[in-house]
Amino acid sequence: MGNAQTWSARRILAPASALSASLFLLVAVAAAQSGGGGQSGGGGLLPPAPPEAADATCVEKCLSLREVAEGGRIEVTGKHLGLVETVRFGGRAEAKALQPSESRVVAIVPKEAKSGKVTVIDAAGNRSTTSSVIEVAAAAAVQDAGSFRLREATAANPVAFFLGVKPAQVNYLFEAQGPTDIRVDVIHAGSGETVASIVEESQQPFSANSATWNGRRSDGRIARSGEYRFKVSPLSGGGQSGGADFTFTDHRFPVGGRHTYGDGLGAGRDHMGQDIFAACGKPIYAARAGTIQTSAYHGSAGYYVVVDGRKSSLDYVYMHLGRGGRPKEGQRVKTGELIGLNSDSGNASGCHLHFEIWSAPGWYEGGEPIDPTPLMKRWDRFS
């Protein structure tokens, strides 16, 4: 128990920024004595998770996304960063961690910093290093952007789809003394995390400009569906910036117009999908971009389409479509693209879409049907 008490006291000190070390020591010892300390179980206090630094980018006094002048600011993103106290640069120069949160921490680049990877260190001494390198330049390398003023920024599509007919795009107009390098950050509204950054070089002031986000995070993963904001500012920082709000979704709900849910997976009769009832002739959209694997007719399914989904490893099946308006086999479609009209072709009682999702390797190719209902109800909220 002696080792367990010592370990518990040392680890519990990690979050101690607002309370004294002696208070945390008392709490740790009490937890150990009650059977909850250390690794002995019993529902005691657990040590905080160590930080996981993923990426580092410049946010102020920037020459590029990963090139910053002395005295500028960088942002480190990742996980478990709320207890980070120190940010270490190349040359072992250190700076105090600012605005730490679960997913991000900011630091001012000290004068003695050198180019290199960035390391974050928490109160317990746990550390993590980014995979990306921050290049550090002299303070004089950055031009003053104080004359920059964003006059307008609007989201081209209030609801944007991944790989979709309605991409995530911001249109903006700004004032400046001349062509300006513009930084567009994509910020998740709920967490405040900057999930991606775009640089548009030499944009013209007093002109219509735009930037498009591909729906991927800076680490390459597809961003989760939700509310986001474009933030438009000069790359070097300064001036008056602003932004525009939009909704991003990785899928589109496949039925246009008012609709109701019918039978789901199983339904006591080996039903392999979800029925969505809507008026005859309503549009049916591709829930996810992909390639038309099958476009055919079957006595039970009626006119149907199978889409081999892009970046998903899934097949999406649409049954009881109308005869016209269906894409041809081999054709590529985007998320939200029209692929048919709601109908009652085949063995159907009333106009409705029968929708299925199949796991890899695909529809009747060795895959298995997946319950689409929870996914469809989530897409329904966003689109």
Image: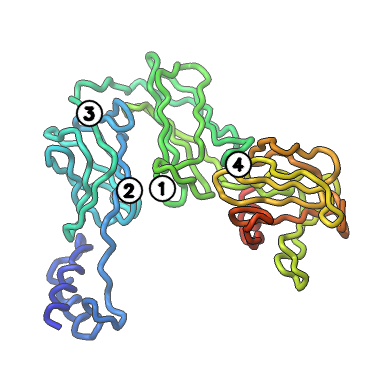
Query: Where, by quadrant of the figure, is residue 235 drawn?
Result: top left
Mark 4 residue type = Val
110 horizontally vs 74: left or right: left
Disc with the residue nearer the chain's start (4 vs 2):
2
Disc with the residue nearer the chain's start (1 vs 4):
4
- Mark 3 highlights which residue? 69
Disc with the residue nearer the chain's start (2 vs 3):
3
Distance Cα–Cα, label 1 vs label 4: 19 Å
- Residue 104's tag is 2
Distance Cα–Cα, label 3 vs label 4: 37 Å
Cβ atoms under marks 1 and 2 closer than 8 Å = yes
Residue at image point 67% right, 37% down: 333
Instruction: Residue lying at the far bottom in this picture: please name it.
Output: 34
CA neighbours of label 4 inside 10 A, class few (<14), some (14 to 19), many (20+): some
- Mark 4 highlights which residue? 159
Place of residue 5 in the rendered image (x, y in percent of width and height, measured from the top left): 15, 78
Mark 1 residue type = Gly
Mark 2 residue type = Arg
Cβ atoms under marks 3 and 1 closer than 8 Å = no
